[in-house]
């Protein structure tokens, strides 16, 4: 499964720097003994994906990443990042066999401890407004569903043997928009995320007999490139904690779900939204 956390304080709130230091030391000791953990992370170049890669890398994990953009060594200073990154458009389902082949080549027979399906797209109108079910074209529906739903399905299927060998963990990134009409996220994005939440339950049921756990996280308003300052100001009043979240806060929940601390957690969708769902 994943990485043992030093104590349960790490899952009750933000990860203190002192705890993270002890965690990194513990994991590095395992790495020295040849017990290297490996994850595949999609959409690693910015936002939640970037924060997730950084946290796992600091904890001693090897990060295999893919995105439409090339690797940026200045922004992403994790070890072997350039060698373990490959460019691919996961929104084109014809590219998925190539992506799976690339991952298997980099694993070279080693097990895969975590698959984090983070890549996603939320298209807007030319003026930046949400795209409704009345205004979304067929091509847009297909593009959104291919990236947000079909890619996670095919990656999980294609890397099943590698995940089973590690008793690994899959984490799907859904959204608060999957359970309510959202002021910014369009219809195609929202329904694709609702479908991804349903897929998480199905995969959890089907993969559990093989020792693979499957969970989802459902972020609310997180301070990324997708959230403009105007949008942030508009939504803060509806959040009980009266602030938006940070990518680091989301990454820590993903880390927990991939760790041995979550060894009896599967089929869950964890809301990360400051109470906005209440």
Image: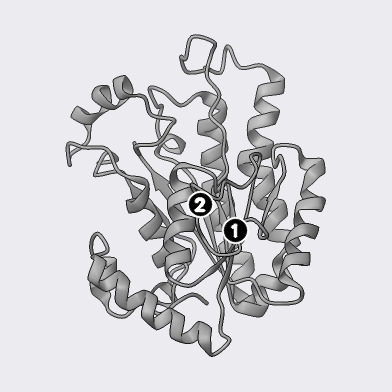
User: Element under label 2?
Assistant: loop
Residue toward you, 149 or 204:
149
Q: Choose top left, top right, bottom left or bottom right for residue 170.
A: bottom right
Q: Position of residue 192 (x, y in %)?
A: 57, 36
Q: Whole-Å distance between the Cαs marked 1 and 2?
A: 7 Å
259 sits left or right of 85 in the view: left
Classify the position of the C terminus by image quarter: top left
Residue shown at 40% from the left, 27% from the top: 182
Residue to which mark 2 is pinned: 76
Q: Earlier in the sequence, mark 1 or mark 2?
A: 2
The residue lying furthest to the top in this view is 127
- Above/below status of 50 relative to 58: above
Looking at the rendered structure, the number of numbered marks drawn on it comes to 2
Q: Which mark is residue 81?
A: 1
Near mark 1 (Cα within 10 A), the count class, few <14, some 14-19 or many ≥20, is some
Query: SS at mark 1?
Result: loop
User: In percent of the image, x 73 and y 60: which residue is there?
Assistant: 157
Q: Determine the residue positioned at 55% across, 75% down.
A: 37
Residue 130: image location, x then y, percent = 47, 18
Q: Looking at this rendering, what residue extends furthest in the front direction?
A: 74
Image position, residue 94 (x, y; %): 82, 42
């Amino acid at each position: 499964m994943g990485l043992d956390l030093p104590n349960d304080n790490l899952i009750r709130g933000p990860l203190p720097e002192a705890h993270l230091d002890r965690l990194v030391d513990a994991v590095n000791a395992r790495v020295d003994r040849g017990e290297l953990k490996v994850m595949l992370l999609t959409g690693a170049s910015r936002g939640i994906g970037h924060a997730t890669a950084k946290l796992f890398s600091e904890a001693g994990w090897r990060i295999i990443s893919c995105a439409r953009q090339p690797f940026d060594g200045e922004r992403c200073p994790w070890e072997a990042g350039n060698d373990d990154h490959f460019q691919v458009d996961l929104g084109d389902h014809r590219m998925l066999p190539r992506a799976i082949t690339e991952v298997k080549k980099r694993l070279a027979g080693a097990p895969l401890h975590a698959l984090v399906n983070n890549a996603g797209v939320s298209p807007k109108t030319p003026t930046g407004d949400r795209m409704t079910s009345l205004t979304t074209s067929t091509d847009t529906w297909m593009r959104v569903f291919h990236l947000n739903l079909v890619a996670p399905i095919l990656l999980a299927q294609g890397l099943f043997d590698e995940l089973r060998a590690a008793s690994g963990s899959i984490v799907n990134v859904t959204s608060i928009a999957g359970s309510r009409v959202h002021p910014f996220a369009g219809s195609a994005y929202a329904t694709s995320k609702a479908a991804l939440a349903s897929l998480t339950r199905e995969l959890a049921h089907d993969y559990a007999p093989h020792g693979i756990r499957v969970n989802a996280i459902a972020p609310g308003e997180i301070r990324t490139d997708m959230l403009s300052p105007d949008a942030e100001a508009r939504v803060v009043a509806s959040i009980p904690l009266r602030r938006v979240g940070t990518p680091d806060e989301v990454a820590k929940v993903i880390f927990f779900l991939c760790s041995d601390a979550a060894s009896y957690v599967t089929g869950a969708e964890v809301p990360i939204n400051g109470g906005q769902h209440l």
